Image: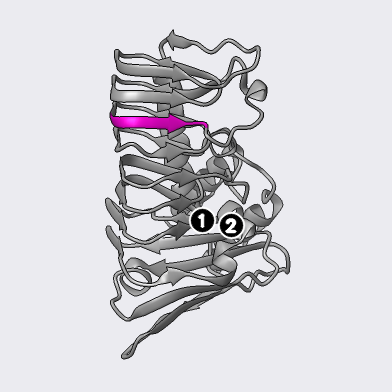
Amino acid sequence: MRFVRFAAISAALATSLASAHASVFASYNLVVSGNLQNNSQDIEGRALVGGNLTGGAVTVGLRLSPASNFVGQSVLTVGGNINVSAINLQAGNVVRQGTRSGNLNFNGGGSGVQSDIVSNVASIASGAASEIASTSAYLRTLSSNSSATFPNGQPGPVNFVATPSPAASIAIFNVSAANIFNNSLIQQYNLTTGGASSIIINVSGTTVNLNNGNFTGNWTSAFARAKVLWNFYEATSITLDRNFNGAILAPNAHLTNSTAIDGSVFVYSFTQNGEVHLPLYTGFVPAPGAIALMGLGGLALTRRRR
């Protein structure tokens, strides 16, 4: 009875807060809590790096258009040191706390003045890291209402079938990395959206390796790229050797990619060997009050059991 009551509270909160967007998700195309090694790759939107930024020629804000809309905004924010061959900033400002080496090219154009600003951004970085961690922890508590099937015994597709309840609400999958990614039998990934307003995929497992199969059909749609969130709540290592679709939330993981990611990225550290594309993630995230309420609810249930 107590479990059912807790699950009902969880589902009700998810439904009632489906339109709430935490600031970090609504603002950034890429958030790396620790260090980012960018090997001459594009980041189409705004980026926040809590640690050091190293690598080659980094292009940021490539798809922020018109650039005049971002005058005075921080398009690249770095809490540590910057040591790259070049930064090509297509809009807005660089805001950093540490040192910078390498060329800095302001390509925003127009009448707006772009700047390289030294400021204390530790609170921004720590606030973002806390937000993505608490969001991941909250989402993993949500009860599944949709299911995925995967190949077993012979090659085939992974089929995600969203069955939100009620209709047009959030579809929630709870899957394991071993079945969905670390599976040599996978040939492709299919998605049936089922009219969901957004889709949360909670993925268990510490190690994720995507080196088989391709995302097809609805996975390549604007909906999937903006409204699907992969919550790798246990992952410490994610390696993507295929084009990936949907936003990635992995607060404890080091991510390595070799091809593009079509969606926003929120990770602990990142070796970037492929582009990170817009759109921003605009699907469901809990409001801060909902996370606090769930924490209190869980505490109350624990005390009641005692």
SS majority, magenta: strand
Indicate the secondary structure of the residue bearing disc 2: helix
Q: Could you say which quadrant of the image residue 12 lies in?
A: bottom right
Residue at figure coordinates x 59%, y 68% from the top left: 218
Identify residue for label 1: 246
Q: Earlier in the sequence, mark 1 or mark 2?
A: 2
Residue at figure coordinates x 30%, y 66% from the top left: 211
How far across and down, in percent of the image, does residue 245 sit? 49, 58
Q: Which mark is residue 10?
A: 2
Spatial distance from mark 1 to mark 2, Cα to Cα?
A: 24 Å
Left or right of 50, for residue 215: right
| In the depicted structure, whether residue 287 falls above or below residue 155 | above
Residue at figure coordinates x 33%, y 90% from the top left: 154
Q: Nearer the viewer, residue 301 or 29?
A: 29
Looking at the rendered structure, the kind of residue marked 2 is Ser
Look at the image and give the residue range highlighted in magenta: 55-61
Residue extending furthest toward the right: 167
Q: How many C-alpha atoms fall within 10 Å of the one at disc 1: few (<14), some, or many (≥20)?
A: many
Left or right of 192, for residue 296: left
| In the depicted structure, whether residue 88 falls above or below residue 154 | above
Number of marks drawn:
2
**Closer to the eye: label 1 or 2:** 1
Residue extending furthest toward the bottom: 153
- The quadrant of the picture occupied by the C terminus is bottom left
| In the depicted structure, whether residue 39 falls above or below residue 168 | above
How far across and down, in percent of the image, does residue 192 sit? 60, 74
